Amino acid sequence: MKKKLLFLGPPGAGKGTQANLFCKKYRLDHLSTGDLLRDEVSSGSVLGLKAAEIMNKGELVNDELVLSIVEGRLVNNNGGWLLDGFPRNVNQANALKNLLDKINQPLEGVVLIKIANEHLIKRLLGRGRQDDNEEVISNRLQIYKEKTSPLIDLYSQQGILEEIDGNADIDVVFSCIERALGR
Ligand code: B4P
């Protein structure tokens, strides 16, 4: 059973929603860099204040900060884990590879949740988080296209990428993910 996983997809594709369900059912450690960064913001720390400014513009937070958050959690994990929202660019993907080689925990599966732009804009506007307004969403989409989407080819070439249609109800998408991962 694959227990070292990564969910990839544009903002609003449902990575967080699906990762939550999946980790509860299969008892994996859910590592959402978005949630971890929002916790840092709520703590009111200096790092959190800096991160909030960047997130509210829809930009990517500094790689070193995100890496340090993820590294701490992965190094201390001896069961399965699911990365949600990380890596988000090639530099983060390379750093993840180095870290996983070092701790001898290779990535076993990547799920790409694909979704049409009009669906995700509607979903994000409906969610109404601070970074969910039209201007910021359009910036997040642009950044996804430029910086995150190259990871699709990278993981596809490694033969570990599964593509899922995210334009369906939550339970339907969930079943597709389970099937793709052989559950
Ligand atoms: P994230 O927290 O990762 O959030 P996201 O990509 O916007 O959303 P996600 O795809 O998880 O959608 P969700 O399930 O919530 O990133 C936020 C910000 O954090 C980034 O812009 C960046 O600034 C920063 N950040 C995070 N990771 C980083 C990293 N590695 N490096 C640098 N910066 C980083 O679903 C969205 C909505 O749709 C919800 O309301 C949900 O209920 C609804 N929904 C989900 N599935 C649905 C379905 N099937 N049908 C209908 N509605 C659905």
Image (cartoon, rainbow, N blue to C red):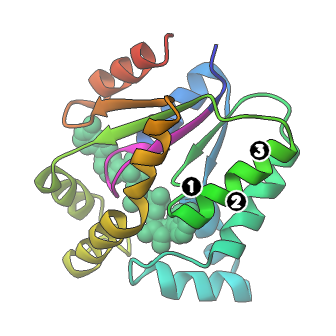
Q: How many marks?
A: 3
35 sits left or right of 123 in the view:
right
> Which amino acid type corresponds to the residue marked 1 in the rendered image?
Phe
Q: Is residue 84 above or below residue 27?
A: below
What secondary structure is marked by label 2?
helix
Question: What whole-number distance in Å separates the C-alpha atoms at marks 2 and 3?
Answer: 9 Å
For the record, the magenta segment spans 5-15
SS under mark 3: helix
Q: Is mark 1 within 8 Å of ligand 1?
A: yes
Residue that numbered label 2 is attached to: 95
Q: CA distance from mark 2 to mark 1?
A: 11 Å
Q: Secondary structure at mark 1?
A: loop
- Please give the label number shown on residue 100: 3
Q: Nearer the viewer, mark 1 or mark 3?
A: 3
Residue 41's x, y, as percent?
62, 76
Q: Position of residue 153 (x, y in %)?
A: 40, 46
Q: Quadrant of the N terminus?
A: top right
Work out whether 62 lies above or below 68: below
Q: Amino acid at mark 3?
A: Leu
- Earlier-in-chain disc, 2 versus 3: 2
* Among the two numbered marks 2 and 1 on one chain, the one whose residue lies closer to the N terminus: 1
User: Sequence order check: which comes first, mark 1 or mark 3?
Assistant: 1
Looking at the image, is mark 2 or mark 1 nearer the viewer? 2
Look at mark 1 in the image and give the residue it sits on.
86
